[in-house]
Amino acid sequence: MNSPSQKQRVILHVDMDAFFASVEQRDHPHLKGKPVIVGSPADQRGVVCAASYEARAFGVRSAMPSRTAKKLCPNGIFVPPDIARYKEESGRIMNIIRPYADTIEQMSIDEAYLDITGRCEGNDQEHRLMAALPMAKSLKMVIHKERGLHISVGIASNKMLAKIASDYDKPNGLILIPERDKVAFLGNLPVRSIHGVGKVSEGILLKSGLTNIKDIQNYPGRLESLLGSFGPTLKAYALGQDDRPVETSEGVKSISSETTFLEDTEDRTILKRALHEQAEEISEKLVRHGLLAKTVQVKVRYSDFTTLSRQTTMLDGVQETKTIYRTACQLLAKEKLVSRPLRLIGIGASKFIPREREQLILPLVYS
C-alpha cells in the first residue's frame, strides 16, 4: 500500500463545520448559540439535513427522522433548507481553497481533499508536513474573515489520515498527524474510524473482539478470514498506509468493488455481507464524485476460474447503497449465478450522469 511516491505526499482534508446550520447561524444572528436543526419540520415526514453543534449535544444527527430529533431536542429550532444558498456559499469557499492546492478533490458540498505536496519544501516528510501548517492556518483565517465560517483541517501524508485528523478536534480544529506517530495516533480510535469500515464490517470486527484500531494493528491472524479481500487493505489502513491519490471526478468511467474469498463459498449470509459492503463502497464513491450510475453489474468467479458477469441499465441513475445492493441481488437471482461455490463476487457501476446536491437532499426532506 505504501509506494515511494506516496511517502512524499502532503494532503489536507478540509471540512466545513456543521455547514448548513453554520450558514443559518451566520445569516440569522438570533440563531447563534441555539440548537439549530436544518431539515423537515418535526410534524412532517422527513429527515434532518444538518444540525448545529448545540443540537448535536442532544444526539441529533443528519439523516435522522425529524420527529426523532424533536424528541431528543425539544427546544430545537427547525429551519427549512435553502440548498441554492448553501451551494452558492460552497462555491465561494471552494474558490478560496482552490489556489492553495496542486490538486483538489471535492467530496461533497462541504468537504474536499487538497494535495499540496508541490508547495511544501523540506528535507524529509516530517518537515514537509510541518510546512503545511502555516498554509492551513492561513486558509482557516481567510475563510473565517471573508465568509464568517469555521472549517476544520487535517494534515497528513495520505487521504485516510487527513480525514481522520480533520474529524478529530471539531469544530474549528487543526490537527497534523506526524508520519512517525501515525500508528500510535490511530491506535486508540474506534475501528469505524477507518475508511471503508461500514456498519456491517464494524459488527464483524466487534464480534471478533476488535474494538479499536490497535486491535487490528496487533491482530495475529489473517483478516481475510473476517472480511475477505478487504482484510489486507484494512490492515494497511490500520497502520496508516493509504496510496489513493487526490483526483477529480473527470475521466471516471466505472467504479467497482470485489471480494475474493479465502475459501470458495455459496453461503448466502457470507455472500450478502460481501455484496452489502461492496454496495456501500460504490455508493460512497458515487457520492464523492457527485454521480449517479445508470448501469449496475455483478461479477462472479467459480473455483475453476470461470468468470461470468451480468448487468442491467436503468432509466434513472442510482447512488444509494440499498438500491445498488438490491439491484445486484436481483441480477444474481435472475441469472442463477450462485449455482455453485464462488471464489469471487463483485459489483460494478458505470454509465454515469451528474447529480446535484439538492437532488440528493430535497426528496429526503419533503418525501
Image (cartoon, rainbow, N blue to C red):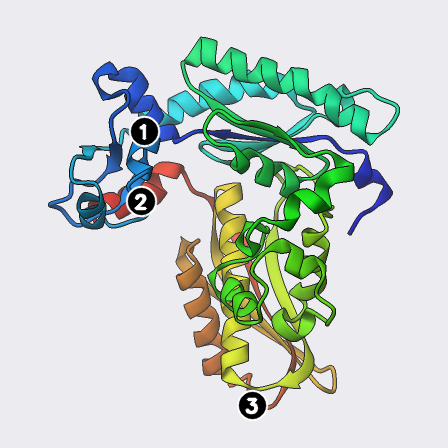
Question: Disc 3 vs disc 1: which is toward the camera?
Answer: 1
Q: Which sits in the foreground, 1 or 295? A: 1
Q: Amino acid at mark 2?
A: Gly
Lateral position of residue 337 relative to residue 33, left or right: right
How far from the left and from the top, in percent, is residue 91?
46, 22
Residue on which disc 1 sits: 21
Q: Nearer the viewer, mark 1 or mark 2?
A: 2
Residue displayed at 63% across by 43% down: 160
Marks 1 and 2, the one that precedes in the sequence: 1
Using the numbered discs, state the Cα–Cα distance from disc 1 to disc 2 in whole angstroms.
Answer: 15 Å
Quarter of the figure with residue 309: bottom right
Amino acid under disc 1: Ala
Asked whether disc 2 touches disc 3, contact meaning CB atoms under 8 Å apart, the reply is no
Q: Secondary structure at mark 2?
A: loop
Residue 345 visible from this viewpoint: no
CA gap, disc 3 to disc 1? 51 Å
Is 124 positioned to the left or the right of 88 in the image?
A: right
Query: What percent of the width, then of the height, locates residue 291?
Result: 48, 45
Residue 46 visible in the current orientation: yes
Q: Residues within 10 Å of mark 3 (few under 14, many from 20)?
A: few
Depth check: 267 or 190 in front? 190
Q: Give residue 184's position: percent from left, percent from top.
A: 70, 45
Secondary structure state at the residue bearing disc 1: helix
Which residue has dot 2 on it? 59
Q: Earlier in the sequence, mark 2 or mark 3?
A: 2
Where residue 339 is drawn, which disc sits there? 3
Packing grade of label 2 (10 A; few <14, some 14-19, many >=20) is: some
**Which amino acid is tagged 3?**
Ser
Q: Nearer the viewer, mark 2 or mark 3?
A: 2
